[in-house]
Image (cartoon, grey):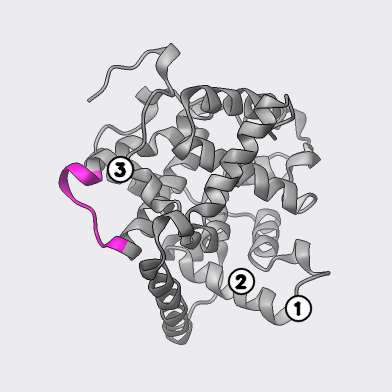
Amino acid sequence: METWTAASVDDLVCVELPRSSRLLALAMGAANVIMQLSNPAVGQGVAHSRVTSGRLDVHPIKRTRTTLSYLAVAVLGTVEERRAYRRAVTRQHAKVRSDRDPRATEEYSALRVDLQRWVAACLFVGSRDVLELVEGPQAGASAERFLLEGRVFGTTLQMPPSAWPGSTAAFEEYWRGELTKLRIDDEVRSYLLGIARLEFAAAVLPERMRAWHQRLTVGFLPPEFRRALRVRWTPGDETWFRRQRAVFVRIERVLPLAASGLVYRLLLADVRWRIRRDRPLV
């Protein structure tokens, strides 16, 4: 569909993907983090990371800003902005390696292409879920284009475009295979449940709100991830979740995309300001 070289790895202009940059994606964010960390190597890499400046449980505001800024740059940014963010992330990711982790039982490196492809795939699935909840199922050329654009989630890191599945059928085959590898050990499970329950914000958020967020987050997880996380999910939970989700979807369908995606555009503006001022991006 397009000719790529190492120098033009970020040249893809996103047309379909920006339609998923909505408030609903923010509500689903914690679930997507859990999905990413359900890969045992990714889970240990994050839970054991000694790069404390990027840990959600240590610096929740900074980590949330940098993650959402990365998504904004990947989907809405220019080639130069993607490359600038990739350089900044690479410097941090180079420090996250299992050979520096005495507790590691999995071999990992945040620069491994297969792990970056998995993270990108989770982000793509989350974006597709947002779009389909709001606009309905995508098919044909639109679905293939959406998949192609989903590649930016990996190429804005260090994943080469050739590592991304070339069709929706190839992606589904890859995704089904990866689902069989999900595994969450007790330490990573505790870390992930803390994210779902917003334990890092326990000083400012009431228990009832944090419990609501945990239940909503578990609801947004596909069944395979719930099983890996070893959480109980009843028909009553599913009924409750569907009602909650329907409220979000109704809001999205009446909000103009410009309003729903404002957070991402503000974050992109902040990244551009940081680049001009030579300020740290991550």
Q: Residue at x 52, y 42 (%)?
A: 71
Task: Give the mark, 1 or 3, whose residue is nearer the N terminus.
Answer: 3
Name of the residue lying farthest toward the right: 203
- Which residue carries the number 1 mark? 206
| Disc sitting over residue 10 in the figure | none
- Which residue carries the number 2 mark? 214
Report the amino acid beneath label 2: Gln
Q: Name the front one of labels 2 and 1.
A: 1
Q: Is residue 42 visible?
A: no
- The picture quadrant where one finds residue 246 is bottom left
Q: Position of residue 156 (x, y in %)?
A: 50, 30
Q: Residue at x 63, y 65 (%)?
A: 196
Task: Give the mark, 3 or 2, whose residue is nearer the N terminus.
Answer: 3
Is residue 215 shown above or below 174? Answer: below
Q: Which residues are magenta?
A: 135-143
Circle 2 Cα neighbour tier, 10 Å, few/some/many (<14 / 14–19 / ≥20): some
Q: Relative to 4, is 264 on the left or the right?
A: right
- Which residue carries the number 3 mark? 146
Name the quarter where the N terminus is drawn: top left
SS class, disc 1 = loop
Is residue 22 shown above or below 14? Answer: below
Is residue 153 shown above or below 129? Answer: above
Q: Rounded to the nearest whole Å, what is the CA distance between mark 3 and mark 2? A: 29 Å
Report the amino acid beneath label 1: Pro
**Residue contact at pointers 2 and 1, CB within 8 angstroms:** no
